[in-house]
Image: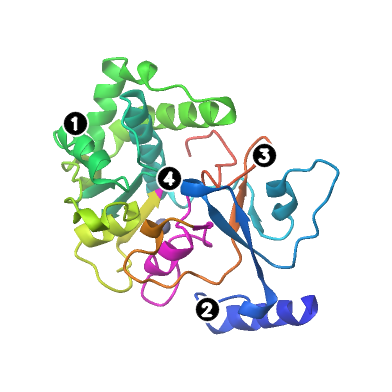
Amino acid sequence: MWTSSTKSMKKAQTIKEAAPLYSESSIDRVRFGANQSLIFIRIRVPLTPRSDGESKLRQMSRSVVLRKPRSYKHQRKEQTLRHTASVVKSILDSNNVRGYQEVQVGVKGRGTVFISTNTNLGNKYLRDKLSKYSLKTLAEHLSSDRVASTLAPVDGGRHIRVNRHVKKFITRVPSLEEDWAQNSIQIPNPVDKQEDGLHAERRIKRAMGIEGPLPREVSIKGIRRPCAHCFGEMQYQGGVSVAAGPGPMWGSQAASMGNVLPSTRVTHLTEDRNGGITFDHDSDSDSDADI
Ligand SMILES: [Zn+2]
């Protein structure tokens, strides 16, 4: 069964990148967490629970696509968008803005940078605080006022990761000559109350006025990979996605907003620089180098 599904995976890949890699019958969906943080992770083969104390996430990591730290050498723009997402999340957290789950950042061509959370409240805060800046002036503000040092510390490995991103943002962005780094930051308009919770990347897509596949000139990156629902919405014309694969499927009603079908591809999880397994952020950079 494993052999046949692998064969069909390769065949599907050659036909169309966006096609499901596995048929519904060959994969399992595993529940993880509970209530608001309930997620479903698609694994290749049924999980045989172990009793040796190994975490469920670690056990599942052998049956998903595990993404290790990688080079962003040819994706500097996308890397800067990721750094921006970390900086903005730190600003929100250090100012006690609660209830949001994610920050995503998008650019269309040379034009406007859109920054969004997945809540109207989160976006209201960003609109009040960030609309007067461009990425460049925000980076200058953070470095000149030593504001960066006041950004919320977070526990464990994420602390190091966020600090690295803040540092990169402050050192790299002021030297960017591109228009998108100098144009005013835009925050997507609020959505209707019943739609509040709509995921950040889909708010950005709406704010850009895009329906259907993304034009090639669009870059959207955030802290997490697009979830299984957003993954299909984040496809370029031609079928390649902004992410190599979907993150988990979130159990919340907001995740399935708009009746989009969740991806049936195997979940992509992250192995961080310390060998930890997480779905809280996408692949780390494999280097601290600037170029
Ligand atoms: Zn999503």
Cα separation, mark 2 vs mark 1, equals: 41 Å
Residue 119 rendering spot, x and y as whole percentages: 29, 46
Instruction: Give the image quarter of residue 177.
Output: top left
Cα separation, mark 3 vs mark 2, equals: 29 Å
| Mark sitting earlier along the chain (2/1) | 2
Residue 95 rendering spot, x and y as whole percentages: 30, 24
Circle 2 sits on which residue? Answer: 19
Q: Is mark 4 within 8 Å of ligand 1?
A: no
Label 1 crowd (10 A; few <14 / some 14-19 / many >=20): few
Quarter of the image where ligand 1 sits: bottom left
The quarter of the picture where the N terminus appears is bottom right
| Mark sitting earlier along the chain (4/3) | 4
Label 2 crowd (10 A; few <14 / some 14-19 / many >=20): some
Cα separation, mark 3 vs mark 1, equals: 34 Å
Residue at screen point 52% across, 57% down: 247
Residue 198 rendering spot, x and y as whole percentages: 31, 56
Specify whether 1 is left or right of 130. right
Circle 1 sits on which residue? Answer: 129
Circle 3 sits on which residue? Answer: 276
| Cβ atoms at labels 4 and 2 below 8 Å apart | no
| Mark sitting earlier along the chain (4/2) | 2
| Amino acid at circle 3 | Gly
Circle 4 sits on which residue? Answer: 79
Q: Which residues are magenta?
A: 222-250
Determine whether the residue tagged by mark 3 lies in a helix, strand or loop.
loop
